[in-house]
Image (cartoon, grey):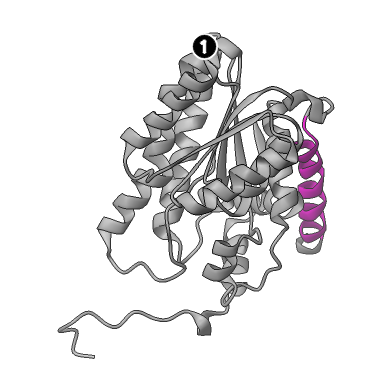
Amino acid sequence: MWLLLMVLIPLLGLALAVYFYSGHGNFSKEMLRGKRVLVTGASSGIGEQMAYHLARMGAHVLLTAWTDTKLEQVMEKCLDLGAASARYMSGSMENTAFAEEVVKEAENTWGGLDMLILNHIGQTFYDFFNGDVAHVRKLMEINFLSYVAMTAAALPMLEESKGSIVVVSSVSGKVASPFVAPYSASKFALEGFFSSLRHEFIIKNINVSITLCILGYINTESAVRAVSHAVKLKPAPKEECALEIIRSGVLRQRELHYPASTVTTTLLLRNLAPRLLDSLIRSSIQLENIKRPPPPQGSGH
């Protein structure tokens, strides 16, 4: 029975991966031509790659991130690649007022919005939780509350255009694992909020799609820097990941799993064999490379 289960689980995972990964309908780059797209976290990593893909497809792009200098470079490259237009705004998403200002800029510039891609994250660490509540609060503000603020501000324009909201999340927002507690909490919050909002859109007949992108380990500079010393996995390419995110939003998929087989199998194991999954997660980490926190003062050790 155990051997049968070990064979069936990967096969079922792959079958589901095909479903989530392929989406419904055919994707064409022409679908983005002339579309007005706002991309957050666009100065590096997946966000930067999405900006370049959108530019090649002839979209209008508004880019935002923390770093002004890098954003300007990304914007200029987007124009060289064929973007219908490209603009940028830099600022901290820790301030929800800035999040709303970015959406207002899209309205002032284009008079509307077709796609909102929420991709930014705050700085996080792959380490034991050290009791820093302020860090948890900051991550919730950047990784979650700013997403809510931007969605609320953009919704009237998206309703008018029958547009799409694309939320870049993580397998850590579906499955708990050690050393990412604050980050994981913010990603679980995205799952709850946007899945609930999707129900409300259907009830109210609001023709705006919500796509949750559940990503595994991607070879962005920040991810590799944070976990490569401890995780025994090969990261997936950010360029392909970025294209799949755009594709899933255009095709109005409910959920994207990338890398498909890895993420879908993980979620399947979560439901069928959670203890086995927990064990596999822990065994995939090189614990000797995780710095253990010092014992509490006065512990007597």
Residue 113: x, y in percent? 56, 21
Instruction: Look at the picture and state if 243 lies above or below 6.
Output: above
> Which quadrant of the rendered structure holds the C terminus?
bottom left
- Badge 1 is on which residue? 203
Q: Secondary structure at mark 1?
A: helix
Residue name at image x 58 percent, y 56 percent? 274
Q: For this rendering, which residue is in front, 17 or 59?
A: 59
Q: In the visual, does 85 lie left or right of 64? A: right
Tell me which segment is drawn in magenta. Answer: 4-23
Q: In the visual, does 75 lie left or right of 189? A: right
Residue name at image x 52 percent, y 11 percent? 203
For the residue carrying disc 1, how many other residues have a C-alpha within 10 Å: few (<14), some (14-19), or many (20+)?
few
Specify the farthest residue to the left. Answer: 298
> Would residue 244 be seen by someone viewing this image from the given angle?
no
- Inspect the image, locate mark 1, and give the three-letter code of the amino acid beneath it: Ile
Residue name at image x 72 percent, y 51 percent? 239
Q: In the visual, does 255 lie left or right of 287? A: right
Q: In the visual, does 165 lie left or right of 77? A: left
| 214 drawn magenta | no
> Would residue 138 be seen by someone viewing this image from the given angle?
yes
| Location of residue 210 by image quarter | top right
Residue 21: x, y in percent? 77, 40
User: Magenta-highlighted stretch: main secondary structure?
Assistant: helix
Q: Tell me how many marks there are.
A: 1
